[in-house]
C-alpha cells in the first residue's frame, strides 16, 4: 500500500507524478529491478539494501535504502529527492521512504 502522504505528493507535483507513472514499467518487468545487497539486523529488521534498476533508454542506476531513506545516482534524484527508479523499487518490495527522513524540516 502506498502511504497517504506519498499519494498526495504524487498528485500535487506534476514531475513527481510523471516519475511515478514511469516506475510502473520497471515493475512490470521484474528483471529490470534486481536486489544486489541486503543487510538485516538480529531481529530480522531491514537496515539497508541496494537494487539495480535497468532502463533500456537511460542505462543502469543504483537505488540504495538505508534506515528509512532512499537514494539513487540518477540526475532527477539530485533535484527532487525521489525518482522513477526509487518508485519502482518501492512498488516492488512495498517499502516506502519515511516522511520525516525525506522532509526533515516539516
Ligand atoms: Zn533514480
Image (spheres, helix red, strand yellow):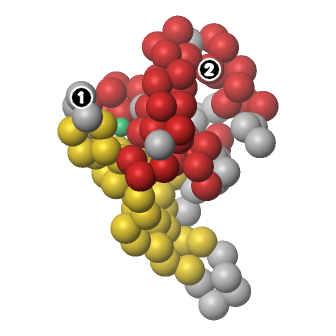
Determine whether the residue tagged by mark 1 lies in a helix, strand or loop. loop
- The disc label shown at residue 85, or none: none
The N terminus is located in which quarter?
top right
Q: Quadrant of residue 10?
A: top right
Residue count near mark 1 (Cα–Cα under 10 Å), binned few <14, some 14–19, many ≥20: few
Quadrant location, ligand no. 1? top left
Find residue 42 and report its image quarter: bottom right
**Residue 32 % position (x, y):** 39, 47
Q: Residue furthest bottom?
A: 42
Residue 10's disc is 2
Q: Position of residue 49 (x, y in %)?
A: 46, 66
- At a point 73% along the width and 30% down the height, the residue shown is 5
Q: In the figure, is residue 63 to the left or right of 67?
A: left
Left or right? Give the position of 40 relative to 70.
Answer: right
User: In this rendering, is residue 72 above or below 5?
Assistant: below
Name the element at disc 2: helix
Q: Is residue 63 at least partly visible in the picture?
A: no
The answer to whether mark 2 is within 8 Å of ligand 1 is no
Q: Residue at x 40, y 71 (%)?
A: 37
Amino acid at each position: 500500500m502506498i502511504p497517504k502522504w506519498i499519494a498526495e505528493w504524487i498528485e500535487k507535483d506534476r514531475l513527481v507524478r510523471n516519475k511515478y507513472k514511469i516506475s510502473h514499467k520497471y515493475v512490470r518487468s521484474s528483471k529490470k529491478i534486481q536486489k544486489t545487497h541486503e543487510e538485516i539486523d538480529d531481529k530480522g529488521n531491514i537496515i539497508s539494501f541496494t537494487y539495480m534498476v535497468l532502463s533500456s533508454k537511460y542505462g543502469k542506476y543504483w537505488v540504495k535504502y538505508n534506515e528509512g531513506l532512499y537514494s539513487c545516482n540518477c540526475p532527477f534524484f539530485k533535484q527532487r529527492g525521489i525518482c522513477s527508479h526509487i518508485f519502482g523499487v518501492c512498488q516492488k518490495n512495498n517499502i516506502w521512504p519515511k516522511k520525516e527522513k525525506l522532509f526533515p524540516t516539516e
